Amino acid sequence: PFDAAGVPPAALVSPSRKRAALAVTWCVPVAASERAAVAQRKPLAILGRALSAPHEAGLAEALRARGLAPLSIELEPCVSTRTVVSTSRWVLWQLEVALRPEAVPRWAEALALVEHAVAGLALEGVPQHVAAEAQQRADDAYRSGSARLPSAIELSVSLQAGLASPHI
């Protein structure tokens, strides 16, 4: 889903006293025809849930099995995703992996696992149960009032598309 424009992700390793991390960031283009759907359905949130959810064949388990990420008793989750910034034409999306301090020199191995996991989802798609769980979490957050308000860009895209925003 990310290399349609042939743009590789940017990776940054951040060793620190608190926690070492590998942050991988993609600039995801948003076509005019997809703007309303992206603003309303948050496909990157669903993709993020698929990549960060703890499951047997997941990215977190692959990182832990190779000694790259802290064990689940030390840190859960060790993989997180977020939208850094969003415009009507592109989204800067980031996946962060917590690294064990001794694994910082092996950051390229962690990056290869991240790219493999993203490529796998691009080929196979997000499993239906993961998409349903991510949607349920978003709905629950909205009902409980913990969901953030839509950004001006999201509202603008919704209005331009002639659709009502689900957050209002």
Image (tube, rainbow, N blue to C red):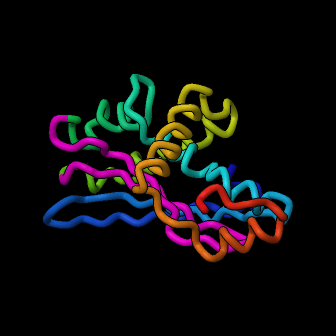
Residue found farthest to the bottom: 152
- Position above or below: 19 against 131: below
Q: Is residue 7 left or right of residue 45?
A: right
Q: Is residue 14 left or right of residue 127?
A: left
Instruction: State whether residue 113 appears in this view.
Output: no
Instruction: Give the residues in magenta.
Output: 73-101
Q: Is residue 40 left or right of residue 48?
A: right
Q: Total of numbered circles in the picture?
A: 0
The residue depicted at 19 percent of the width and 54 percent of the height is 101
Q: Quadrant of residue 130?
A: top right
The residue depicted at 35 percent of the width and 64 percent of the height is 13
Residue 98 in picture, x, y percent from top left = 29, 51
Residue 109 in picture, x, y percent from top left = 40, 46
Q: Is residue 79 left or right of residue 26?
A: left
- Position above or below: 52 against 93: above
Residue 16 part of the magenta-drawn span: no
Instruction: State whether residue 53 appears in this view.
Output: yes
- Along the line of sight, which residue is nearer the eye, 86 or 40? 40
- Along the line of sight, which residue is nearer the eye, 15 or 89? 89
Considering the image in quadrants, where does the C terminus appear? bottom right
The residue depicted at 63 percent of the width and 49 percent of the height is 43
- Along the line of sight, which residue is nearer the eye, 128 or 56? 128
Residue 79 part of the magenta-drawn span: yes
Residue 134 in picture, x, y percent from top left = 52, 39
The residue depicted at 72 percent of the width and 74 percent of the height is 156
Residue 146 in picture, x, y percent from top left = 40, 56
- Position above or below: 163 against 117: below
